[in-house]
Image (spheres, rainbow, N blue to C red):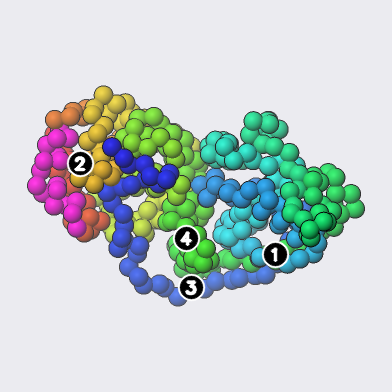
Amino acid sequence: MVVEEKGELLVEEEYEVDQGDGYIDEYDLTATPNDFNVMTIYSFIESGAIQIPGFQRNYVWDIKKASKLIESLLLGLPVPQLFLYESARNKFLVIDGQQRMMSIYYFIKKRFPRKEKRAEIRKIFAEHDGIPEEILDNDEYFQSFKLSLSKLSDEKKSKFHGLTYAMLGDYKTQLDLRPIRNIVVKQNSPKDDDSSIYEIFNRLNSGGVNLKPQEIRGCLYHSPFYSMLARINYNPIWRQSLRMSNLDLHMKDIELLLRCFAMAHEYRGYKPSLANFLNNFSKEAKSFTREKNEHLETVFLKFMREIEGLNLERFVSDKSRRFNIFLFESLFAALTHREITLGKEIEYSISDDVIDNILADENFQDACLAGTTNTSNVFKRFDIAEKYLGL
C-alpha cells in the first residue's frame, strides 16, 4: 500500500492534458522597474504590503545560501531582480524572489528557520498569516542567523563570517540602503481575470524547478479561504484517506481540497478546462466572508466524520494504488453542494455498500478512464453518485 513517494502525492487524475486550451489572449500590462532598498523590502514584508503566502513553496534555502546573498549585498555585487504583482494599491504579491526576500527578512530579524521545523512553520504561517514573535524567538523553531560564509582563499575567511545583523557596525547602514531592482507588474486588461500573472509566474520559474499549478495558484489567490484549506489539510481522516501522513511537496493535497470545494460549490455549473475552473473559483473565493469560510470548514469536517467509520482503502485505486479523486469528489460534491449553497446543515449518511456500488458501476468506471474532466464525464459521475446515495 504505497501512495506516498518522496513527499509527493500520487493521484488517479494527473491532468496530463488539462492545463487550459492552449490559447493565450493578448494582455495589456504595465511593468514598472523600481529600486527598493533592503530596509524598504523588509518593512514591506513586515507590514504586509508585500505578501509571501504560506501556500507558496516552503522556504528551502540553507543558511550558507542565504548568507551568500547577504554577503553579495554587503559587497555591492548584483543580485537577481525581483518580480512583484500589484494586486491593489500598495499591495504586492511575490511572483519571483520569495527565497531572496525571506532571506533578507530573516537576517534582519536575526533568526533563521530550522530545517526540521519548516513544515510546522508553514502551518503556523498559514494559521496566522505571518510568524508571531513568540515563535520567531523560540529556539525550537529558529536559530541565530550568523552569516556562514566560505573562505575567500585558502587562508582568508570573509570578514562578514559569523556576524549577525546587529554586529555589522557601519556596514549595517550600507546593507539597509543597498538597492535591489524589482519589476512591478500590473494587469490592466482583461479586468476579469489574473491569467497574465499566472503565465508570467509559470514562465519565470520554468528555467529552474518548475512550479506546479497549485503553487502558482497559492501565490495569486491567497485568501482566508486558502488559509482554511491549509488548516483542514491537516485533518487526520483526510490524511488517512490520502494514505499520506506528510504534506505534499507541491501542494497537490491542497489542490484536491480546492477541487472538491469548487465542484461542490458550482456543481452543475462546472465548465472545463479544470485548470481555469479552479483558477476562477480561487479568485471568487477571495471575496468569501469569514462566516462563509467557517461554514465551508464545518461542512468538510462533518463529511470527515461521516467517512471516518468507512473502509478508507476504497479511496485508493486497486490497480494503480493512487488516490481516487473521482470517487472522493463525486461523494463530497453530491452530498454537500446543497449545504454549501443553502448555508444550512442537511443530514445524510454514507455506507461502504454505497461506495462499492458506485465503484462497480460500469458507467462510473468509463467516466474515470478518458476525458475525465469533460463536462459530460464529470456530470455522469455526479449522476451515478446521486443514484446510489438516494438523492
Q: Assess disc 2: are there few (<14), some (14-19) or many (≥20) residues with their C-alpha within 10 Å of its C-alpha.
A: few
**Residue in view at x 52 percent, y 73 percent:** 28
Looking at the image, tell me whether mark 4 or mark 2 is earlier in sequence order. 4
Location of residue 387 in the rendering, given as x and y in whole percent from the top left corner: 12, 39
**Label placed on residue 79:** 1
Give the amino acid at mark 3. Answer: Tyr
Kindly give the residue lying farthest to the bottom in the view shown: 26
Q: Secondary structure at mark 4?
A: loop
C-alpha distance separating marks 4 and 1: 21 Å
Kindly give the residue lying farthest to the top in the view shown: 309
Looking at the image, tell me whether mark 4 or mark 1 is earlier in sequence order. 1
Give the amino acid at mark 2. Answer: Asp
Asked if marks 2 and 1 touch (Cβ < 8 Å), the reply is no
- Mark 4 or 3: in front is 4
**Residue in view at x 85 percent, y 45 percent:** 167
Asked if marks 4 and 2 touch (Cβ < 8 Å), the reply is no
Looking at the image, tell me whether mark 2 or mark 1 is earlier in sequence order. 1
Location of residue 58 in the rendering, given as x and y in whole percent from the top left corner: 55, 47
C-alpha distance separating marks 4 and 3: 23 Å
Which residues are drawn in magenta?
Answer: 354-370
Give the amino acid at mark 4. Answer: Asn
Residue tagged 3: 27
Residue tagged 2: 318
